[in-house]
Image: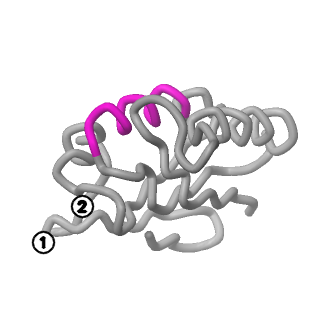
Amino acid sequence: MKFIHLTDTHVIGDGRLYGQDPAARLRAAVASINAGHGDADFVVLTGDITHWGDAAAYARFSREIKALNMSVHLLVGNHDDTVAFGAAFPEIPRDRNGFVQSGFDTPFGRFLL
């Protein structure tokens, strides 16, 4: 099994963060994954997905990550806002206490997030 792990994308709604555009960097990572790692089973993206946890940042992140040619599993970090994240990604599994964590079966066993 091959999976890709991305972390700390720190996407913001618009502009630059510390002199860089995090969404442009994510776009480059997605393009690289699609071009050179199409044989991966999935991508796991751990937080911090956004830098400030605002709706505009989640919208921008969503536009970029949808370009992946494989499934993606998202987890939040300390910069993320779980309420705003949940509004942007209501399909992402949560446990019975509302935490963004889950598991899924693969041909090689259970994968826990």
Residue 96: x, y in percent? 13, 69
Query: Looking at the image, which is closer to me, 31 or 53?
Result: 53
Residue 83: x, y in percent? 16, 51
- Crowd around label 1: few <14 · some 14–19 · many ≥20 (10 Å): few
The quarter of the picture where the C terminus appears is bottom left
Above/below status of 15 relative to 77? above
Main secondary structure along the magenta-highlighted residues: helix
* For the residues bearing labels 1 and 2, Cβ distance under 8 angstroms: yes
The secondary element bearing badge 1 is classed as: loop
Taking the spot 44% from the left edge, 63% from the top edge, the residue there is: 104
The boundaries of the magenta stretch are 54-64
Residue on which the image places disc 1: 97
- Crowd around label 2: few <14 · some 14–19 · many ≥20 (10 Å): some
Q: Quadrant of residue 70?
A: top right
Could you give the CA–CA distance between mark 1 and mark 2, rounded to whole angstroms?
8 Å
Residue 94 image label? 2
